[in-house]
Image: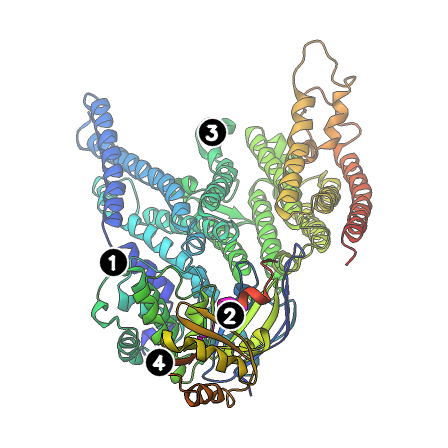
Amino acid sequence: MRLAALFPENPVLSRELRTRMRGARAPWLLFAYVGTLSLILFVVYFAWARSQADSITGGMGGAAAASFSIGRTFYEVLFVIQALLVTLITPALTAGGISIEKEQRTYEMLSVSLLPRRHVVLGKLAAAVAFVGLLLTASLPLVSLCFLLGGVSPGEVGAAYVALLATAFVYGAAGIAWSAVARDTTAATLLAYATVALLFFASLPLAVPYLPGFYGGSAGAFGLASLNPVGAVLYGTRPESYFGHTVPGWVPAVCVNLMLGAALTAAALHRLEYPATGRAWLVRLLTVALCMVLVALFCGGLHASYSASGFRGAVAAGSTGLTAAARRTFVCWLVAFLPCLLAPIFATGAGLYGDAAHRRRAGEPLSGLAFVVVTTGVCGAILAALGYGVGLRPFALMVPFVAFGLAGIGLLCSAALRNRWTALQATLALSLGLFVIPYSVATARRGGENGRASSRVALLYLSPHPAALEAGDPQRSIPAVPPDPPFAPVTGAVYFGFGIVTVPLAFLVQRSRARRDAAANPG
Amino acid sequence: MPMVELVNLRKEYDNRLVAVKGLNLSLEPGDIFGFIGPNGAGKTTTIKMLATLLEPTGGVARIDGIDVTSDVEAVRARIGYMPDAFGVYDDFKVWEYLDFFCAAYRVPRSDRPGLIDMVLDLTSLTEKKDAFVDELSRGMKQRLCLAKTLVHDPKVLLLDEPASGLDPRARIEIKELLKELSAMGKTIIVSSHILPELADFCTSVGIIERGEMIVAGPIEEIMRSVLGHRVLEIRVPESDRGAARGILEGVAHVRGVKLAAETFRVDYEGTLDDQSEVLLALIHGGVRVQSFAEQDTDLEDIFLRVTKGLVA
């Protein structure tokens, strides 16, 4: 059988590959890419040469060490810059993918052909990732300098390339997803860059603890350091421990990136499909799987610190304990943040039931409430089961109640605003506000105030943030606030109250709107 | 079995705007149906529902007996759709553009070169085969778009304003091409708001306003049902005009006689068979008839009579 027969023909991919390389743009971009890297390398080399000019002593041994050092520096600089360039370039390659077809009025003709929509989305995405692959390949001659100088292993370089391609896939998928959703390329590009910035900076703390000076310079594994492209190129081959099993850092990061990219690509496909086939469950399934895997991986990363001596033992171990507590705090924080992200996405729509198209693409907002509560509950349960420590059970129980409250707010916004995007934005703003503002206000230092007596302390129970801090590290003192009563049960009750009030209110608003519409349009 | 069939087709948007209200239509193979209506009347919405781009809210639309909502792929294989405002991939060569759509319609690779040559020949673009699409004139791009709708040999062509923005020559070329395609047995639905353009070659027309089909059928029939009579144009020498007027006013079924631009315009209520009686009466009366003809079908007149200038 011929190789071509194994793969269905994708004319969109052929077109993208053919036309992207046609004309002067692609060679110029390649030239600019390699030129930028060369220039930076040149500057780094001269800075290093000047600093080393008088210090290379000790004969052959000293020269070899210096060579290894500059080889390592070259590698780090080259790949960190490439990680940043991939982050900047990839969304631009895909954010216009679908929207430009609509703007150029070619999309309708593609739509009525027998070409499946997945070929359009996958063709555009694959072409963009292939182009990023070409840019990365173009850097090989420069990377080979590192091998010449030493200090870097081929495995490290290979892992960095694989991780960068996986990053390009996720960031490209974010671009294509927004391109399928947004009305024009400008909006799609802005939203794609906002998403990429969120992904980049949200994953940065995973890579940052490795940097000297952070948490006392301890290299305790958070796990998933390679999820961030900068972390991936610096620590891709560093072993990470999950439930006692050690794997190179790039492996779990690539797996998570592939899952996240698949979820985003599925969302884009889902959006474009006609006739819409009601596969909201697929997007939800991928989302819950991704959340569960992420939480499980982070919990697995805690294993190395807590399995031997338990949480208190780890705390007693001094600086390692501090890092271990910080790691668990991060995982708790992530789980507490999940409802703030999921509720606006899944529990909003045009009205409580959404319009027909929205129901098929994202599911009803009402069922979204149940989905968010169950997903966050499952993630909380995973954390309680695998999170190694006391005090996690009340926190894990709190999380679905927070999700219930925020999803209730989402439903209320949907019923009141009757516009999917406005409701999403309003709910997202309220969720993030509730997460951040009470903590910031209550912990702001003001001279002469007694923390316990201050009325601002009560605000802390409005946010899941302090509960996450408390669960992550019970010994950490939140400024001026003793944890009495404990945060998790009270915050859970507060959000349950939000839900109990907002959900019936949303139904009332929906019904009153329907009555008003019926009165306005009797026919 | 009709090639295109609409039964109470309805489209309502989420904001409760009703774009199409209970449309009924039946077309046989080889028919050219002209869809006439003011902007916003529902022409494009109807064509898009037939093209499987919009889901009908109610009623049934069938192409070759297949419901457009039940088997979308089978319907797409049978239709060629050319949108009102279409774009082309400017960075493609003409043959690459057609090859792209051949692949999109799953035409086997081995069949493509011959097929591309054939549609280029049909649309008179053979000499532009290796030119970039960007270099083509608007008329050529229009023909190229028509060529791409033909690559999978569709049974039904849905053409939304195919001649808009074209110069007279390009418009005539498109018309000739459509006649040729109709002769090949293809059913064509063409929408336009330029009425004389449709009167020339459509076998039937439908006038739509505010989503409702006001009148539909062969132009002759519509003319008779709407206007209620036909207009005969008779030219005679100036010296015979007095006698001619007297004779014409005495012929049965003649409702009125007007002289305009040296030509008598006679409102005639009789049948086509009786029409010759008018000419015979003139000749027997010794009038030297220079020309005798039925006035050209005036779609614009019909359109103005049946529509109210409203849009949905």
Q: Which of marks 4 and 1 is nearer the N terminus?
A: 1
The reply to whether the C-beta atoms of the residues labelled 2 and 4 are less than 8 Å apart is no
Q: Give residue A217's mark.
A: 3
Report the magenta residues as a range. B294-302
Quick check: do tags 2 and 4 share a chain?
yes
Cα separation, mark 1 vs mark 3, equals 63 Å
Q: What element carries label 4?
A: loop
Q: Give residue B290's mark.
A: 4
Quick check: do tags 3 and 4 share a chain?
no
Q: Is mark 2 on a helix, strand or loop?
A: strand
Q: For this view, does B213 lie left or right of residue A143? A: right
Please name the residue that numbered disc 2 is placed on. B35
Q: Can the viewer see residue B47 in this picture?
A: no
Chain at numbered mark 2:
B
Judge the density around disc 2: few (<14), some (14-19), many (≥20) Cα neighbours within 10 Å.
Answer: many
Cα separation, mark 3 vs mark 4, equals 109 Å
In the rendered image, residue B157, in percent from the top left (x then y), is placed at: 44, 75
In the rendered image, residue A56, in percent from the top left (x then y), is placed at: 20, 25
> Looking at the picture, does residue A66 appear above or below residue A283?
above
> Looking at the picture, does residue B171 appear above or below residue A409?
below
The reply to whether the C-beta atoms of the residues labelled 3 and 4 are less than 8 Å apart is no
Please name the residue that numbered disc 1 is placed on. B135
Chain at numbered mark 3:
A
Q: Mark 4 belongs to which amino acid?
A: Gln
> Looking at the picture, does residue A113 appear above or below residue A228?
below
Cα separation, mark 2 vs mark 4, equals 37 Å
* Foreground label between 1 and 3: 1
Q: In which quarter of the image is residue A212?
A: top left
